[in-house]
Amino acid sequence: MNNITPTFVFLSIALLVWSSAAGLSSYLGRGFEREHGSSETIQRSEVATPELKELREAVAADPESVDAKMGLAYGLVRAAYGASDGQLLMEAVQTFSAVLEKEPEYPPALLGLAKVCLDSGIIDKAIDFFPRYLKIVPDDVAAQSDYALALLRGGQIDKAREAIATAISLDKTNLAAQMTLAMIERSEGNEDKAVRIAKAAKALAPDETIATRIDGFIANDQAEAGGGAEPSDERSPATVVAKYFQNHEIIGRKLDGIHWHSPEEVHISVKDFPVEQMPPFAKAKFESNVKEALKGLAESLTVVLVDAKSHAALLRIPISQVGSSPASS
């Protein structure tokens, strides 16, 4: 059985949208937008409420239908990501779980939960679900890459290398596999090698948006490797703040602009970022991550999230002056 506890279900909701940990496919701007063999095709467009209604009605009409439940589960995931809606994600996790209650090793449900766990930062569960899926569908290169990323995030570097070697042996031209390898190299301090792999992988990018994201990865690596950049404790606040939010897994996709209101206050303009919908502890985690990443950057600094349309302040984050050097995202 899948052994999904109520606590896990609750955590998966809150952390998916707001955690700083996200899967490589999210980092590349793809999310769930790919097809995995026997699993349902996950469309690129958001699911509108009327479509969700139809998907729920299909399940109600045939409660025993695995296909109907999977269609609803994937639809809910798409909608949850598109609308930053934790309740929809809860329903998605429960629907995947219901499928596994009936068919414990059903590949699409295992994969769906593995991806949700990875993108939520619930790494131990992701590391549980990916192998179960890959035992049945071993030639899924994207899933092998995501499994390697989960192992990397879980600190299991040797196993991550084994998993990504398997993925690359299946398809040397797979962008996710190559970028995951670059991340592994970076995690071990091999910045030059990471940059070289990422530059080669950029040629595989399907569009300019993803190419730009890879450029951000390369630039960050080069800065950390000393590629002409100033030492981290001497970098300008403008450069550090820009890199942090441009490469942030959540804010990066919603970023509209960065404006310095004064040397002590920077405004981060975001589109469709519903701060008021964030659970209190998720909001606290987000603020804590920002403070930790930018601590010690200036004698006095306040980060203000601003709505791109109304220009209203959504959230003010005074950065603690404890510490000396900013971290990367």
Image: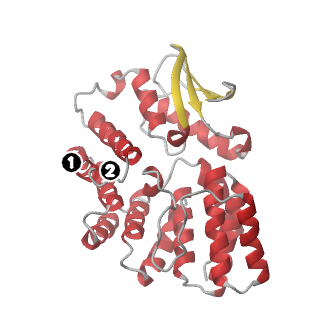
Looking at the figure, which quarter contains the N terminus?
A: bottom right
With respect to residue 311, does 161 lie above or below?
below
**Can you give x and y, in whole percent of width and height, for residue 223 in the image?**
29, 33
Looking at the image, is mark 1 or mark 2 nearer the viewer?
1
Describe residue 242's horizontal placement relative to residue 284 as left or right.
left
Q: Amino acid at mark 2?
A: Ser
* Residue for point 42% across, 64% down: 146
Give residue 187's mark. Answer: 2
Looking at the image, do the residues carrying marks 1 and 2 touch, with CB atoms under 8 Å apart?
A: no
Most extreme residue toward the top is 262
Label 2 secondary element:
helix
Q: Quadrant of residue 276?
A: top right
**Can you give x and y, in whole percent of width and height, for residue 75 in the image?**
64, 66
Label 1 secondary element:
helix
Give residue 196's mark. Answer: 1
Q: Assess disc 1: are there few (<14), some (14-19) or many (≥20) residues with their C-alpha within 10 Å of its C-alpha.
A: few
* Residue for point 56% across, 63% down: 116
* Residue for point 46% across, 51% down: 29
State the CA–CA distance, disc 1 to disc 2.
Answer: 15 Å
Q: Amino acid at mark 1?
A: Arg
Describe residue 165's horizontal placement relative to residue 101 as left or right.
left
Residue sitting nearer the eye, 254 or 186: 254
**Can you give x and y, in whole percent of width and height, for residue 133 in the image?**
47, 78
- Residue 59 visible, this orientation: yes
The image's colouring method is secondary structure
Describe residue 120's horizontal placement relative to residue 210 as left or right.
right
Q: Earlier in the sequence, mark 1 or mark 2?
A: 2
* Residue for point 55% across, 64% down: 43
**Can you give x and y, in whole percent of width and height, for residue 110 in the image?**
54, 76
Q: Quadrant of residue 304?
A: top right
